[in-house]
Image: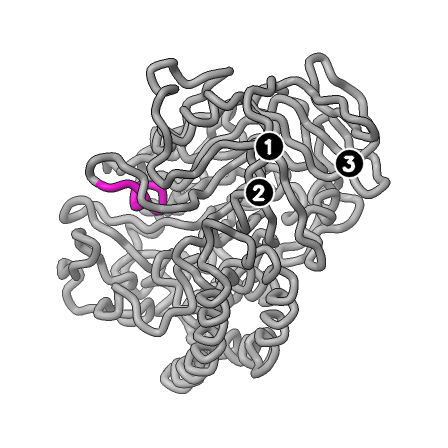
Amino acid sequence: MQTRLSFGAKSRVAGGLGLALLAASCDDGAAVSGAGGQGQGSAGRGGTASVGGPGAGGSSAGLGGRTASNGGGSGAGGATPGVEPSPGSAAGEADWVFDDAALRTYELTLDADVWAALQLAAQDEEYAEATLRLEDTELSRVGLRFKGSSGTLTSCFNDAGERICPKLSMKIKVDEYLPDQRLRGLKRLTFNSMSSDPSQLHERIAYRLFREMGVTAPRSAHARLVVNGESLGLFSLVEDVDGRFTDDRFQGGDGNLYKEQWPDSADTDLMTERLVTNEDVADHSVLLQFYSALAEAEPSELPAVLARYMDVPELFAYVAVDRTINNWDGISAFYCYDEADCENHNFYLYQHEDEPRFSLIPWDLDNTFALSTPLDEVEGVFEIPDDCSLRHPAFGKQVMPPACDRLLQGLARSDRAGYVAALDRLLAGPMASGNVESWIAAWQAQIEPVVAEDMYGPGLEEFRSGLESLQSRLSELRERALADRDSQP
């Protein structure tokens, strides 16, 4: 049984983070202004629908004239993979949150000392209690923490533990302290800082490309975040992948959802740790079957195993988008922690409830749309090396060629006509010349005013330069995708 690097569940803070941290201040010099010292209760301002206070139940006036339910429960499932949420579904309630034509401001208030301590202990990724206001709705007692784990968050601190990034990604857990509390049916809100993306558009474009290709993927929008009266600037707001998400996107959405669990291990403890839904049941038998079938198959049998457990055309569509946007930090990047133990990340794996089949859901798509990447010397997903013991250096680690993985090797050995068809559909559809450019023009007009006043963002000049660079790279990425298509056997 393999032992894997594990990113465990986050610990919780129910009101404070320790008095020892309260005297210090952030490295970047950001002042905590505005409503410091406010408590966590509902402010009860005139015209506000206060939701989720102690003992709250039922419903209250919601956003945009709707009713915001404070109860649990999911809406109608039954949607097919790749289909946008229906208005009457649990995920459909969140249409307002991810309205493509809107950029909303999320205001958080919490005790000033707690906020200062939260920033100092950002790498602990612990929740603190806050109040969230979104236009006409206010939710008391939500959980707020920084996010990024061993990736973007760790890179924002130097060896001395000093913060070097002006903006950090954050997560709001609406039901952290009140289990039935929801915001438009949502339990969590993920705000990504986009610190490595001056165009501020990588994630929003990438997720939309996946969705338009019929791949089940989160929705994404932009948002402005304010904490204790201070604007933290522009963030990428990404739909959380959880039980509500699977209920809406899949027929029979009560199957197992795993975060970053690939079928390459029989470690059931790790599977349980990475299980997002059905935690009380934790039945991994189907995933173990998939793992065993891949592990025991002869190379020539891998395509049949893959077709038994996954929708191969859907997987080809996933890979077509992933390769075209040059996602170098997704399912094809296998980082090794010892000679035999290599794993990929930035995805969810969903086990369908009514049949022993799996679907991939993309996640964390900021490292995309580059022409060159740190993994350029690593073989591609369809290149099966003669010697799979060979490794490539990257980021101080060793990287395994992706086609040495049994699942991806099964795809590489499958009839590539499905991949060619997916590329044709992508290049004639969402990636057709001028199409993504039209999204960029609309979204630039939407977010540029916030970029201009964002003290912690790239600045207007760098933002516009980043957009120009992105648009020039799109043409080259299309050319590469055409060459990729023509090179297939």
Q: Quadrant of the N terminus?
A: top left
Q: Residues within 10 Å of mark 2 (few under 14, many from 20)?
A: some
Which amino acid is tagged 1?
Leu
Q: What distance separates the C-alpha of mark 2 from that of mark 1? A: 8 Å
Which amino acid is tagged 3?
Asp
Colour scheme employed for the rendering of this structure: one colour
Image point (20%, 58%), residue name: 394
Query: Which is more N-terminal, label 3 or label 2?
Result: 3
Q: Which residue is mark 1?
A: 108
* Secondary structure found at label 3: loop
Query: Which is more N-terminal, label 1 or label 3?
Result: 1
Is residue 96 at all visible to an observer of this figure? Answer: yes
Image point (51%, 37%), residue name: 171
Residue 243: percent from the left, percent from the top?
59, 37
Q: Residues within 10 Å of mark 1 (few under 14, many from 20)?
A: many
Q: Which residues are magenta?
A: 152-158
Q: Quadrant of the C terminus?
A: bottom left
Rendered image quadrant of residue 156? top left
Q: What distance separates the C-alpha of mark 2 from that of mark 3? A: 16 Å
Asked whether 252 or 248 is in front, the reply is 248
